[in-house]
């Protein structure tokens, strides 16, 4: 049986150029761990994979911070998406 993380990985693997974000580095800059990140065109796509729709306000804040930090570093627009069991929810 495929879990949500595996399904998310399979879905996003070929949609753009992957960006690997070291958790320690992004946390040091005030962000939160990023599950998946890729660039397509001039857009940086940050993906959070969850097994449920629950996203605490603190986690949401950290993910938005991560998207903003990475957007500033790469000078790209950023999107933040929540991937839950095959469903996609755009946060911004």
Image: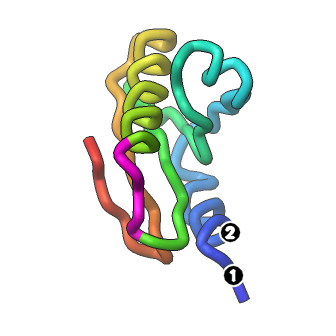
> Does the image show residue 19?
yes
Q: Is residue 74 positioned above or below 50 on the image?
A: above
What is the chief secondary structure element of the magenta stretch?
A: loop
Q: In which quadrant will I find the N terminus?
A: bottom right
* Relative side of 13 to 47, left or right: right
User: What secondary structure is found at the residue carrying circle 1?
Assistant: loop
In magenta segment, residue 55: yes
Q: Which residue is mark 2?
A: 6
Q: Is there a contact, CB below 8 Å, between mark 1 and mark 2?
A: yes
Left or right: where does residue 51 sit relative to residue 83? right
Within-10-Å neighbours for mark 1: few <14, some 14–19, many 20+: few
> Picture quarter containing residue 44?
top left
Percent x, y for residue 34?
Answer: 59, 39
Q: Is residue 26 left or right of residue 88?
A: right
Above or below for 7 versus 58: below
SS of the residue at dot 2?
Answer: helix
Q: Is residue 20 magenta?
A: no
How many numbered marks appear? 2
Q: CA distance from mark 1 to mark 2?
A: 6 Å
Dividing the picture into quadrants, the one containing residue 13 is: bottom right
Query: Which quadrant, please, contains the C terminus?
Result: top left
- Can the viewer see residue 41? no
Q: Is residue 40 left or right of residue 23?
A: left
Q: Disc 1 designates what residue?
A: 2
On the image, the x and y values in percent for residue 90 come to 29, 53
**Which residue lies at the image location 43% right of the left edge and 29% below the top edge?**
67
Q: At x 59% / y 72%, what residue is drawn?
A: 4
Q: Quadrant of residue 65?
A: top left
Residue span colored magenta = 53-57
Picture layout, residue 31 above or below residue 37: above
Name the residue located 52 percent from the left edge and 25 percent from the top edge: 31
Looking at the image, the residue that sits furthest to the bottom is 1
């Amino acid at each position: 049986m495929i879990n949500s993380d595996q399904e998310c990985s399979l879905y996003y693997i070929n949609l753009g150029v992957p960006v690997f974000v070291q958790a320690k580095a992004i946390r040091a800059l005030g962000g939160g761990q990023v599950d998946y990140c890729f660039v397509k065109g001039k857009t940086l796509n940050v993906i959070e994979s969850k097994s449920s729709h629950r996203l605490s306000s603190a986690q949401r804040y950290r993910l938005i911070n991560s998207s903003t930090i990475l957007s500033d570093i790469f000078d790209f627009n950023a999107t933040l998406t929540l991937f839950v069991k095959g469903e996609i929810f755009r946060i911004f």
